[in-house]
Amino acid sequence: MVNERLLKSLINPELRKEGKRHDGRRRDQYRDFEVLIGVVERAQGSALVRLGKTHVLAVVHGPYEAPRHVALPDRAILNVVYRTVTYAVMKRKKPTISKRERELSRIIREALEGVVFLDRYPRSQIDVYVYVISSHGGSRTTGCTAAALALADAGIPMKDLVIGLAGGKVEGHVVVDLDDIEDKIGDADLPLMYLPNLKKLSMIQADGIFTRDELIAAVRAVVDRIEKGLYPTIRETIMRKYGSDSDVYDR
Amino acid sequence: MFTIDKITEKRVREAIKRGEHLDGRDLMEFRPIYIEKGFSPVAEGSALVRFGDVRSTKVLAGVKCEVEAPYEDSPDEGFINVMVERMPYASPFKMRELDDEDIIISRVVDRIIRSSEAIPFEELVIEVGKHVWGIYVEMDVLDDFGNVMDAAGLAAMAALMDAKMPIVRREGEEIILDDSERVPLKLLKRPVTISFYRIDGHRLVDPLFEEEHVADIRLTFGVTERGEICGIHKSGPGLFTMKEFEDLVDNAIRLSNYLRKRLERILKIAS
């Protein structure tokens, strides 16, 4: 039902002349960002992350004793379930698990596995449920941020936080944080998940064509926004809930 | 149904005997109710309903409106579909999949909204026999701290009251949805769901999780603003007399006004 040309024609030419995007953002500007921790009281840990109209809720249960046939002798199993609720998307989503949901469950699990100290909990299991409650572009990266924050809220030891943000290419320009419309009219999409203290990437995907320089520029732009934008906001939220700013986090 | 441990059960029974909930409320008093609409901005309508300040029951409801083929037995009517699902670990007992209780709550809320005639189904037709509006009300329970039934009933109505439908245009055979302009979903009535529980012969509303699972009866009423009863459902093994029932009907009508006021007031502030 989406007509690419129609979407493009809707973009205000004035904005385009000023080098701005369809919603008035600068090219390196991400959408309104907000983090809430501990929203689900039954869970050991939870977080709601909002990036523009994309809202993702993550819930952590565990560690608990894993069923014997799946338990590992030297570490915990990390079980990630990514789901989009039926009303989170423009066209109602069928309630059955889609291939996309399976892929993203795995992507987020792999982005977190290297960061969580799973060897602290042999024969255990940790469940992470990632629920997209409103989807408007960037749900996998926002989901990863929410999952990492929920794990932190659950008090599970981790090397670092994992923060996701997408870059991409729209109308030939490198931009940060594509929304749903830019996802459709854009040329390329580049979701990243990044460890802000260790300065390492834990996941990268790309969809579309980049030149080498564009790719490097996009990755740098996204990392820059995570380090200077998202991470300080998240850190402040955690500090507000869990204590003073002079703590171990400074090291 | 499963059981609560004996010590908690004793605490519940003692509190009820004193004439109060575990948190000190009167038996016929609700926890504070908070409704936040537009919680899922991509949905046509949505609302988050919370019962209580801490350890609160939270239900997130979303409405999607889709152009669908009508049911064969009602080609000239749109339809509604209500679904409630408790998220895993929303309740202390693992529920990875839909269980009976979720289905019961879905069915009861669905029936109450449908039979209240709140939604004019005959106006939700685009072309008789071919295209009608299907209204999907889907709810996720984030935390179950008791009385999901009433919270879900309220959340469903709040989300429907928040819902704005796209406009339909025809171009020949093709149907085009215009998202740029939206109209509020027409609602003729505002039914609310209200449940009474019974523990040791005392009746109460809005139980906490522990109380809910000690109760031997849950009797749920749907009540419209005109004081009409538009749905009844009984759960649990308990028996009750005609007098008890009549008494509950009167109480349902009285308390439903309180719930409806919450619904109307909060939606007004937010918009």
Image (cartoon, coloured by chain):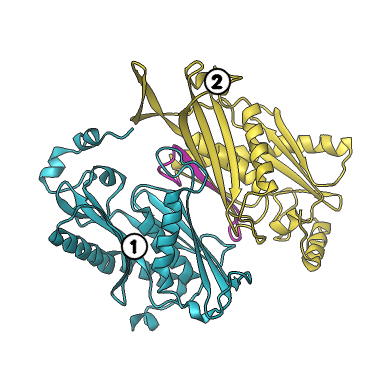
Chain colours: A cyan, B yellow
Element at label 2: loop
From this view, report whether residue A80 is shown above or below residue A182. below
Q: Residue A106: x, y in percent?
A: 43, 61
Report the quarter where the N terminus of chain A lies. Answer: top left
Three-letter amino acid code of the residue under disc 2: Glu
Q: Is residue B261 covered in magenta?
A: no
Dot 2 crowding, Cα within 10 Å, few <14, some 14–19, many 20+: many
Per the rendering, the mark at residue A204 is none
Q: Residue at x 37, y 68 (%)?
A: A162
Dot 1 crowding, Cα within 10 Å, few <14, some 14–19, many 20+: many
Element at label 1: strand
Dominant secondary structure, magenta: loop
Residue that numbered label 1 is attached to = A164
Q: Residue at x 64, y 37 (%)?
A: B109
* Mark-to-mark CA distance, 1 and 2: 45 Å
* Residue farthest toward the left in the current orientation of the protein: A17
Can residue B197 be spotted in the picture? yes
Q: Which residues are magenta?
A: B39-56
Q: For residue A238, which quarter of the picture? A: bottom left
Three-letter amino acid code of the residue under disc 1: Gly
Residue that numbered label 2 is attached to = B77
- Relative placement, left or right, of A200 versus B25 is left
Callout 2: residue from which chain? B
